[in-house]
Amino acid sequence: MHGRPRKPLKPEEEEASAAEAAKLRSLQSQLLANHHQKNYAKEALDVSAKVLEMNPDLYTAWNYRKLAVEHYLKESPSDTESIKAILNEELRVAESALRQNVKSYGAWYHRKWILSKGHSSTDHELRLLGKFQKLDARNFHAWNYRRFVAALVNIPEEDELNYTTNMIDTNFSNYSAWHNRSALLGKLLNKKAECYFPVEKVLNEEYDLVHQAIFTDPDDQSGWFYHLWLLDQTVKTNAPSLVSSWPPHSYNVALSRTGCLDDHTLSPLNSFHSDSGTFPLILYFDQPVQGIDSSSVSVKSTANLIGGLIWKPLSKCNCDAAKAWVSHLVFLEEELNSSEFYSVEVSLGHSEKIASASGSHYVKPTSFSFKVAVHFGKTPIGDCSNEGIWWKDENFSSCGISSQNFPFVSSDNPTIEDNYAASSSEWCAEIISNEIALFRELLSETDCKIGKLTLARLLMAHAATLSPHANKMVQLEEVLELYQDLMKLDPSHFHYYKDEHSLVLLQKVTSTRESLLRHCYCYRDQTSPYIGSTTCLRLNNLSISRMGSVEKLLWVQVLDLSHNELRSIEGLEVMQRLSCLSLSNNKICSFTTLEPLRRLKSLKVLDISHNEIGSHSVDTTRYLFPSPMSHSEENASSSDNLVTDCSDLASYWEAYYLFKDLSLTQLDIEGNVICSERFKAFLVKVLPKLCWLDGKQVQ
């Protein structure tokens, strides 16, 4: 069993163990010889049966027996009695192996394979399962096999659900029974089976059932996990919805390729510089969706746009479904008047092509519009080599931005015709309020870690049901305190609680215009290239370890995330307007972690100094992120595109893969273990437009 120390063997036990090991080696040698010679005689099969009785986890033995079964079935394809005898013998061998190790994957898989042949008694299998589940009611192998048998003979899901009820009534601590219940009930709810509709009635009954388990033994986690599943069923919305966009509805934006906006007196938040003269259009949904293209999203403008729009998902896993999608508007330069605003209208939902990963369609017609002024003057932007950008506090001052000009997503901004406001039923709000009251009462009697975690989740779910005008600060503060307590009570899960605390903190910061404006600053040098009069959002010194609420930050061009505890920057890829970014003094340990930056084509200034890049000999994050060696279309690179004259490419492949498609003019990387003169020379080759490196001009 897990966590139990092994006792040293006595001398006589060691002798018996050595003799058994010698016998097993001898039998395995015979098995392999028979396997190679394709010897399927009865004596050879007896050898494999003895091997499996001693070691049920030897996959080669199970595969050998499968080949033997196929061999005999071909010899007598029409002899029903002979076929049954062969398959029954296999079931006997598998049963014998399971009696030695009831959690043997190979034995269970072999039994499934035999049963799928269609000549065995499923009644016998259900009786056998009953025996195994009496020995260990939580054996997930047996539960998995039960689901297989039930599907094979079309046992009604209602009957199987009743079986889980009986098992739970026998023992509340049966995690496998709770899990199977969630799988069965989810199917019944989705197809609106008789007696399982409406959803509110069914879930109310389930809450009553799980309360009995939780309040009987608050320290047992089985019921808590099922309660988490119930909460997800309570708050989830099937159909995806659009929660934000850039630009927002009724917004005026000035696009410049030169840094000059003529006589347009717009807020710094409204201006956007682009070397290519293209304009990003971003759609952000509440869940990953697919089917975003020119046929499902209509874009019309009073200015002539060049070519059809190509939509791309902003996802680190390069899959077809993503919460955020981006396309770029390209205006026909010859027909533009730089002093005129051109309207752009975006419409979606007129077809059922947009759908979530679960298959739910975006069905509510939606539209929003904004205006764009475009300046394609011949004067180039200021020379970036004259002066770098410095992120010190004294270089920033508070901004006097009017809240009316602030691109904030809320119900008082009629973005997407009020579709941005989440819809929640009265029942949902009522049930969550009742659950909060129950668990407050429970926590008043016992200091239960998972109870605090559940209360935090309930409070966040309740905050989501409130009107956007409601003050959520009190609830968010309470959730932050709960996660602070959990970090102290349960240090083994510290990083999880820290990440959740960070997400709540960022939601608090971005919850109102006023709170977000407190973090907006202006750079002292209004003539600085790529910053100029642009507003800088400073989320530094907040101790955040994870990014969140990015759907409210699509407007940001300059972002300071320095002096935090970031280990990942997942989510930044949707902030397509970012031109300047500081990630200094965080806990980023590799270039692979910075993968989202590859999608920020407007990024010019990057500070990743004083992190932990190069301090770990093995980059474990490469197993969590797309590998540069993967065969995806986007990652495929021909050898012609590599820096073939650079001998350091093999040593700094991750850095090359990150920086090769960026057009950085300023980079700070000092304070990392990897930083050396050799590495800096490599960066200068990879980044031909680089003007400043670690505060010094590049020669």
Image (tube, helix red, strand yellow):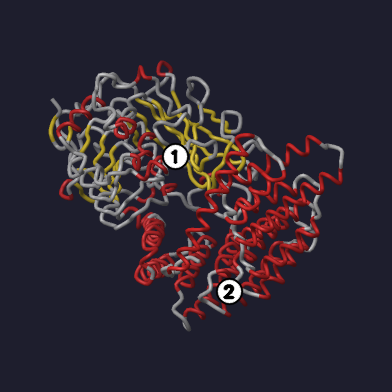
Q: Position of residue 304 (x, y in %)?
A: 49, 21
Up-down relation of residue 197 to residue 643 (above or below): below
Q: From the viewer's perspective, is 200 left or right of 423?
A: right
Q: Name the residue under label 1.
A: 316
- Image quadrant for the C terminus? top left
- 52 or 447, nearer to the observer: 52
Residue 491 shows in the view: yes
Q: Where is residue 134 in the image (x, y as percent from the top left)?
A: 68, 70
Where residue 382 sits, quadrant-wise, is: top left
- 106 or 272, nearer to the observer: 106
Q: Position of residue 239 (x, y in %)?
A: 63, 48
Query: Identity of the amino acid at label 1?
Result: Lys
Q: Name the residue under label 2.
A: 434
Q: Disc number at residue 57?
A: none
Query: Which mark is in front, 1 or 2?
Result: 1
- 180 or 419, nearer to the observer: 180
Q: Which residue is drawn at 66% across and 73% down?
A: 209
